[in-house]
Amino acid sequence: MKKIIITLISFVLIISPLSAGKTVEEILAEFDKTISVPSLQGTFTVKLISKNGDTREIKARAYQKLVDNKQNNRLFIFDFPPRVRGTGLLVHSFLDGRDNNMWIYLPTVKRVKRIALESSGGGYFMGSDFTYRDLIANDLNNMKFELLEEKTMNGTESYVIKCWGKNQEVIKDLGYSYMISYYKKENSVMHRREFFDSDSKLLKIYQVDDFHVSGKYHYPTKITMTNVQTEHKSIIEVTEISTKDIPERYFTTRYLTDK
Amino acid sequence: MQSRFIAYILITLSILFLVPDCFAVEHGFKFVSFADYYGGIEYSDGYENLRSRLFFRPEYSANFEDFGSEIIISANLWAQPIGDPNFIDPYDIPNEVYFSKKTELFDFTVGQKLITYGFADIYGPFNAPHSTNQTLLSLDDQFDGRRPDPLFQLRFYPTLEDIVEFTYIPLTRPDKEQPDDVYLPETHDTVVWDDSSYLTDNLHSFFMNYKRYGENLDIQLLYGWYTEHTPDFVVTNISSSNSYDIKPEYHHKHTIGAAYATRVGNTTLSQDFALNITDDFSGKDLAAQDSDITVNTQILANLPWNILSQYTIVYCYFFNHDEYDRQSDSKAAEYLAEQFHDFHNQPYQHILFFVGHFEKSFLREKLKAQLNMGFFFSPNIYVAPRLAYSITDTSRLETGIEYTFGKPKDIDLRRNPSNDNFFIRFIMQY
């Protein structure tokens, strides 16, 4: 469990808005507002389903708080499977270009370790269909965007936006040649994203099946990530959602070890 | 001794169950069980059964949220089903058993608990609390390596980033050494082990630890005055012609340390620095530990193909090495000094060694492969490959090898005479 851990749960917490041209900016700015919940906590269950039906499960508690417009704190505590129970990950993300700070607590050795997530590369997180790289916010200056069309997808009228790395180095780092995202026309909430591999073949589909709506916020509560090439999929369900304020002390190494 | 132990258990349990039960309680239960087998593959000895275990570790926890308190009770139980019957020492059955009370600024803990200091994962010079099981066959055995001590601990949190900790350990245990006495042929002496479960002659250990987890840098400072779990030895006469029993003796030791961890690019660097001052600072006693300065440097990095790697470099300098009193028989003194220096892992005035850990997962993390490699100050190269396969979410199969290249040092007082082995382990965890 020394492998750097960040949960795929955080994927739904840190989906990074991509911005470019005016129209795209408007859509993404609106999306950013819908998902930027000041405080959020919930219980996540992730089912990993292989092509032959073999199913595994991950359970975790997650807490997120926007400290200010420059810092976002997240805490993840794993409850299942038993071999990772009690493992915790604390992430302090900075939106002004500073490196993220991350600490992992490993209960078997009772030690808090500082880690650097970016070094985790493109491996799959805990056997899911999310790579570690999927979970890192993209530097907007390194991305290009294009509003492709307006289209009805799964019965929802959507804006379709393509984004990709501005050079080969960024594309290699992302692990995808490009991504196509679908935003609801009515409120700019993203409900689907398609990932294309280095040969520009469809690799994975991220599909939001349900949202928790609280005021202006729309938070995904049921997500399916399907690898269409291997037919492996990961289903995330979020329960016990609360948007009550979370005390600052939750995002400390003290709480990381205590919980 | 037994009555003291029973009294301690009773006092601890009394404290635990005097906690009012009128608060909301969240109960937790964990259970780990495994069966494993070790076979010796030492070239010079041929194949032999080394050890087998049926191991159980139940753990109960009660979290009194309204009261800000927590109780943990866990136990270790094992028996050896293959080979000579063997069972866990009854004193080792209680694992962690403690009560914690938490407030906004303070945590207070009483009971038996494992504590760790420093940032280094292996060979950390801050890891002074608790005795070590020196009879382990795998250096990375997670289940039987350290034995918790009874303690009182107070933690103070002046800010969200700072932790000040005071720990008092009234009595501790000796390291678990090999069961048989060791005959030293060149001096005709016999090293006789102390099989006490607790060290009652040299009580009281105290640790002060400061931690800060900052934006760019984590820091730890440590001062410890504690009963050393590794014994010195009482050599009454240095002589090749007369035989004596050499008995262990446990002394207090000071450790003063500073450590940091920081991010360097996409890697994490940590260093632990420690000054250890032993009872025999002058180095006159050939059977006592020398004082030392130890620096542990650890780098955590990802390699291509998503291979996680961690590198540990340990340097030690021993003060007054070879300053021991040779008395009238210098040949016997040199022989004994070599034995005890090696036992204390202090064979030279300077030592430097390196351990690398590499880890990669396959089959969507169902299969994990690890390789530990050690390049020690002696010519030996240590290699320990590991494989772990998760059969289900609650069960897995592990196997591995410990192999040391080169001939082992010809030391009669070696701590682990059976270097090379393999193991297979089936684990169930709930």
Image: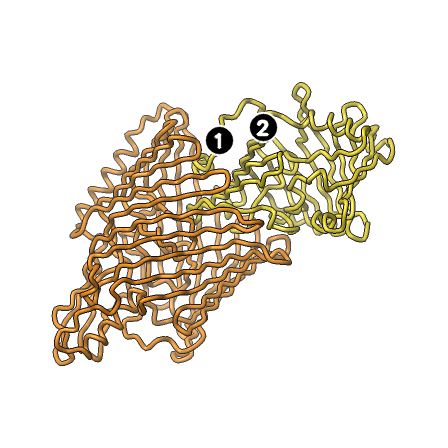
Chain colours: A yellow, B orange
Left or right position of A244 against A201: left
Can see residue B367? no
Q: Residue at x 21, y 80 (%)?
A: B186
SS for callout 2: strand
Q: Establish if B365 lies above or below B187.
A: above
Residue at the far top in the pictured view = A215
Between the residue at mark 1 and the residue at mark 2, the CA separation in whole angstroms equals 13 Å
Q: Establish if B420 lies above or below A47.
A: below
Q: Residue at x 79, y 23 (%)?
A: A186
Residue closer to the observer: B325 or B142 = B325
Give the numbered dot on residue A250. 1
Q: Label 2 near label 1: C-beta < 8 Å?
A: no
Task: Give whichever of discs 1 and 2 has the lower sequence position.
Answer: 2
Q: Quadrant of residue B189?
A: bottom left
Location of residue B90 in the rendering, given as x and y in whole percent from the top left corner:
27, 52
Location of residue B261 in the rendering, given as x and y in whole percent from the top left corner:
46, 47
Whether discs 1 and 2 lie on one chain: the answer is yes
